């Protein structure tokens, strides 16, 4: 590449309109929009969030509306139409999508979650397990076409290596999550009373029954607590179990989640598996205490944040980790999206300079 030539990157986030993928997408859009003089960025996003086109005028955005059938059998059917509008692409970044062919000088696949590799822990029905196993098979088939493979924690990379032990995984990169500026610049309001016990997420691997069991233990010592679970209620907004009134809250804006976490005495996560626990990252910085399952991704995050004071609690027949709030001001630089994306771009630049790949 010429020294003054822009690096061109095509991002495929077409299935990310909620959760951690949506947070990463918005952070990327914001950063590349601000750095458009240095990078030519093209984003493929889901039609459900087409409103983002108006918010980021300095990047090129295509919206697609993949049906479940097309998503299942033909992940990249829309790419030819988009690529016709652009000359050679330097980097193709696929967020969770298998990469079947040479699309850029560097093909980058990012493992967006561990569901395909841990179906026994993440899928409730046989049909869900079948879908995830087929996706895992397609990802494995695409590995020879990938130059860079990333996941969001060291343990996720290790699980990938172990799962595909008979296949060579390309260059590996730990692409962690960041936190937004609002969270970094805001601290707990001393006037707010910590009154909640909170858990986030209701998918199968979140183990809601175990969360409620922990709520019961907390209630025996903190009778003033209000118990809330943020996520789809699966049929009811409130229910009573073990004598506890538990409220489900669905479709909550991100700033409202932060507000609740600032009033949280105990954040609870009983997940059986995680790629990168976004909600725990936010909770550690905002809630008074966190009680979390002892799984590799949680341990990775505690190490990243420099947490060394960990109390072990036995609840039922399982040990959980209890940790205190972490001071966000000490971690602003390393947790910012700006730091994480700059680090990624420096990595890409170093590879492009020495790469002999051609489209």
Image (cartoon, helix red, strand yellow):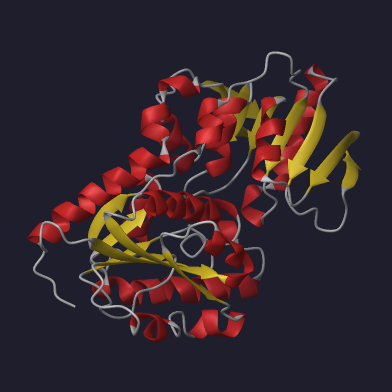
- Please state if 123 lies on the left or on the right of 143 as rendered: right
| Residue found at x 34% / y 38% | 339
Q: Quadrant of the N terminus?
A: bottom left
- Please state if 243 lies on the left or on the right of 307 as rendered: right
Residue 144 image-quadrant placement: bottom left
Between residues 18 and 124, which one lies in front from this camera angle?
18
Q: Position of residue 74 (x, y in %)?
A: 47, 84
Question: Furthest-top residue in view?
Answer: 190
Depicted 226 relative to depicted 157: above or below: above
Can residue 70 be spotted in the picture? Answer: yes
| Residue found at x 76% / y 54% | 232
Between residues 155 and 51, which one lies in front from this camera angle?
51
- Total numbered badges shown on the rendered structure: 0
Between residues 237 and 184, which one lies in front from this camera angle?
184
Can residue 242 be spotted in the picture? Answer: no
- Please state if 167 lies on the left or on the right of 131 as rendered: left
Depicted 63 relative to depicted 96: above or below: below
Q: Quadrant of the C terminus?
A: bottom left
Between residues 3 and 11, which one lies in front from this camera angle?
3
Q: Position of residue 295 (x, y in %)?
A: 50, 40
Q: Position of residue 157 (x, y in %)?
A: 34, 52
Depicted 92 relative to depicted 239: above or below: below
Residue 76 image-quadrant placement: bottom left
Residue 340 image-quadrant placement: top left
């Amino acid at each position: 590449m010429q020294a003054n030539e822009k690096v061109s990157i095509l991002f495929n986030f077409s299935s990310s309109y909620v959760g951690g993928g949506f947070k990463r997408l918005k952070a990327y859009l914001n950063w590349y929009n601000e750095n458009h003089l240095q990078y030519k960025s093209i984003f493929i996003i889901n039609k459900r969030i087409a409103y983002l086109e108006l918010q980021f005028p300095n990047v090129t955005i295509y919206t697609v509306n993949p049906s479940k059938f097309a998503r299942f059998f033909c992940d990249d059917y829309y790419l030819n139409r988009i690529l016709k509008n652009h000359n050679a692409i330097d980097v193709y970044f696929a967020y969770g999508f298998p990469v079947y062919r040479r699309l850029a000088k560097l093909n980058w696949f990012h493992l967006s979650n561990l569901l395909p590799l841990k179906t026994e822990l993440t899928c409730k029905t046989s049909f869900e397990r079948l879908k995830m196993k087929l996706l895992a098979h397609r990802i494995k088939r695409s590995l020879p076409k990938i130059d860079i493979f990333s996941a969001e924690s060291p343990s996720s990379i290790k699980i990938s290596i172990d799962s595909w032990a008979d296949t060579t995984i390309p260059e590996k990169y730990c692409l962690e999550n960041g936190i937004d500026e609002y969270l970094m610049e805001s601290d707990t309001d001393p006037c707010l009373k910590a009154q909640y016990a909170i858990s986030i997420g209701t998918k199968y691997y979140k183990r809601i029954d175990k969360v409620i069991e922990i709520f019961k233990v907390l209630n025996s010592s903190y009778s003033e607590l209000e118990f809330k679970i943020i996520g789809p209620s699966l049929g009811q907004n409130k229910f009573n179990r073990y004598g506890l009134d538990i409220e489900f809250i669905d479709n909550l804006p991100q700033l409202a989640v932060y507000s609740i976490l600032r009033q949280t005495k105990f954040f609870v996560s009983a997940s059986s598996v995680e790629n990168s626990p976004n909600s725990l990252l936010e909770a550690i910085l905002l809630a008074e205490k966190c009680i979390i399952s002892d799984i590799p991704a949680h341990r990775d995050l505690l190490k990243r944040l420099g947490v060394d004071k960990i109390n072990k609690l036995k609840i039922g027949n399982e040990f959980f980790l209890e940790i205190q709030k972490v001071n966000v001001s000490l971690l602003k630089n390393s947790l910012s999206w700006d730091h994480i994306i700059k680090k990624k771009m420096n990595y890409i630049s170093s590879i492009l300079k020495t790469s002999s790949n051609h489209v």
